Image: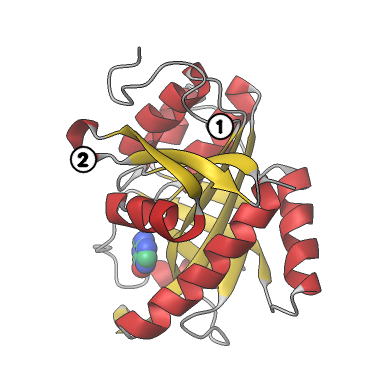
Amino acid sequence: MPIHVRATPGDYAGACLLPGDPLRARYIAETFFDDVVQRNGERGMLGYSGTFNGKPVSVQSSGMGCPSAAIVIEELVQLGVEKIMRVGTCGGLQPDMTMGDLVIALSATAADATSTHYVLGEPHAPTADFGLVHEAVHQAKHLGKPVRVGPIVSSDIFYQPDPDQARRWSERGILAVEMEAAVLFTLGALRGIQAGCMLIVSDVIVEGEFLRISDEDMRKAVDEMTELALHVVTA
Ligand code: HPA
């Protein structure tokens, strides 16, 4: 039994959503799953299994940041999970972005130390699984839901010390900043599982300032993304 995700092989479905927030994991299970069973509560890192449209699926919180996410992802792999879709929030970096926009990540620049340690400091491009990206884009189109598909960046730091950092990422075409996808994609490659990431823009970073979306609008956008993600991982 893994140390942090206190479950045994078979407790988690092959497909698992990975929000950062434990309470969002609980909300997803209670709102979208049938036949819900809690599978983890260790350190408050809530995890659940159930079904979505009759198909087995799980949800597990990753915590914030790549070190926490890496522990959880490694242990989900030990438990037999083969497909992980991060569902989270991000800071929008492009000037035409609006709070509530949906981003599907193609790649995640590793502006974190964990992903870099995993590849022993060698250059590596953390990349999402094409099958998951393709399915997500296809299903979003089918629902008439606009999406932004492109590169994101995973940072170790929420409150950047350099007020110009967001501008430089933006000029390189990076759509959004978050804190977990680079290690998810790196471990997807190293452990041979499918990894993807869908994000709702929760704040737009303009000249170092955070503009925020209301809690109600945020919940609606995240709900729509979650439903889409569940269709994608159970397709
Ligand atoms: N930075 C990093 N992670 C985030 C942000 C952000 O602005 N917003 C949501 N997750």
Q: Residue at x 49, y 69 (%)?
A: 223
Residue placed furthest toward the top: 1
Where residue 50 sits: x, y (%)? 50, 41
Can residue 174 be seen from the camera position used here? no
Q: Which class describes the residues within 10 Å of circle 2: few (<14), some (14-19), or many (20+)?
A: few
Query: Mark 2 = which residue?
Result: 44
Left of 7 or right of it: where is 44?
Answer: left
In the picture of the structure, the residue carrying the numbered disc 1 is 13
Residue 232 visible:
yes
Q: Amino acid at mark 1?
A: Ala
| Residue at screen point 79% across, 72% down | 141
Residue under the point 80% across and 72% down: 142
Which amino acid, by three-letter code, is at mark 2? Gly
Kind of element beneath mark 1: loop
Task: Please report whichever mark, 2 or 1, sits nearer to the chain's N-terminal start.
Answer: 1
Task: Give the structural element (helix, strand or loop) at label 2.
Answer: helix
Q: Residues within 10 Å of mark 1 (few under 14, many from 20)?
A: many
Q: Nearer the viewer, residue 169 or 177?
A: 177
| Percent of width and height locating residue 65 | 33, 45
Describe the colour scheme in one phrase: secondary structure
Q: Quadrant of the N terminus?
A: top left
Q: Residue at the far front: name it.
A: 35
The circle drawn on residue 32 is none
Mark 2 vs mark 1: in front: 1
Q: Position of residue 92 (x, y in %)?
A: 47, 74
In the image, residue 91 sits, relative to residue 207, either above or below, namely: above
Could you tell me which residue is drawn at 52 percent across and 25 percent down?
A: 119
Where is residue 135 drawn, in percent x and y?
A: 77, 54
Report ligand 1 position as a quadrant: bottom left
Is 139 displayed left or right of 151 in the figure? right
> Image height check: is 182 above or below 103?
above
Q: Nearer the viewer, residue 50 or 181?
A: 50
